Amino acid sequence: PLVPVHHIRGHIAANYLAFPELEPPFLCLAIYGGNTLIADVRDYTDIRILGSTRDDAAGECFDKTARVLGLPYPGGKPLDELSQQGDDTRYAMPQSHIEGSPYDMSFSGLKTAVINLVHGAQQRGEEIDRPGLAASFCKAVSESLVPRTMAAARELGYKKIVVAGGVAANSRIRRDFAAAAEREGATLYIPPLKLCGDNAAMIGAQAYYEYLAGSTAGSDLNAYATKEL
């Protein structure tokens, strides 16, 4: 049979491979290049979005920040490695607050702040502390993601927190989520690095649950970039 699988559902399913004991319901943060969202995973094929980015995805912001710092694409890994050499208090980074939408996020302001900081320094002939900027940036992203995710889990009464997607490979985000989960007495699930980025295994894992739910398609199946979750 031909089984259609939503890309985000695939990222979530990477955790089913890494943690066979994991079962819905749980709270999930999906962070990757195409989107950033917080979801209530009620069942394997019943997922409700609680909040999402209003503009840039976190992964997109990582790539653009890496580019302005002269790092290769994709920028997640080199930016993470550079950040581990820096002081995360070196530069003040903006945080977004979406009035009336506690779980929505915005990363365009952070991206713009980094670009303006670098270009401004270049125009003045000043040298940027690249490790410090990378560390400050990673801290800002983490501080945007972790509190919102944990607040959503508290509201729903969930003690299982799942993080999925390519940005879940970031060491600062993994560390901050581990600390937050410990404080809340919650269990954290983040897949190993090899399952964070796009991979066929995660799609196959979710396809199993889609098939059990009776979701199959004909040979005229098309791909949709904006398919609802």
Image (tube, rainbow, N blue to C red):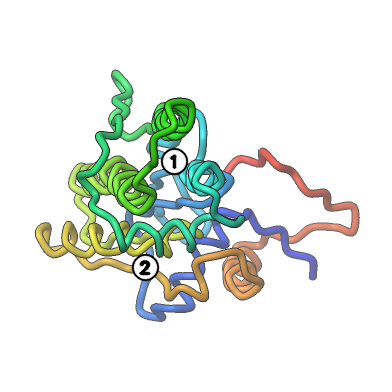
Going by the numbered disc 1, the residue's amino acid type is Ile
Q: Position of residue 44 (x, y in %)?
A: 49, 61
Q: How many numbered dots are placed on residues in this image?
A: 2
- Whether residue 163 is situated above or below residue 108 in the rendered picture: below
Q: Residue furthest right?
A: 220
Going by the numbered disc 2, the residue's amino acid type is Ile
Classify mark 2: helix, strand or loop.
Answer: loop
Q: Nearer the viewer, residue 108 or 29?
A: 108
Is 181 on the left-hand or right-hand side of 208? left
What is the distance, in whole Å, between disc 1 and disc 2 at their CAs?
A: 19 Å
| Residue drawn at x 35%, y 57% as measured from the top left | 83
Question: Residue 2: which disc?
Answer: none
Q: Position of residue 202 (x, y in %)?
A: 58, 70
Q: Which residue is mark 2?
A: 190
Image quadrant where one finds the N terminus: bottom right
Q: Position of residue 123 (x, y in %)?
A: 48, 26
Q: Nearer the viewer, residue 89 or 149?
A: 89
Q: Which residue is mark 1?
A: 49
Image quadrant where one finds the C terminus: top right
> Does residue 107 appear in this view?
no
> Does residue 159 appear in this view?
yes
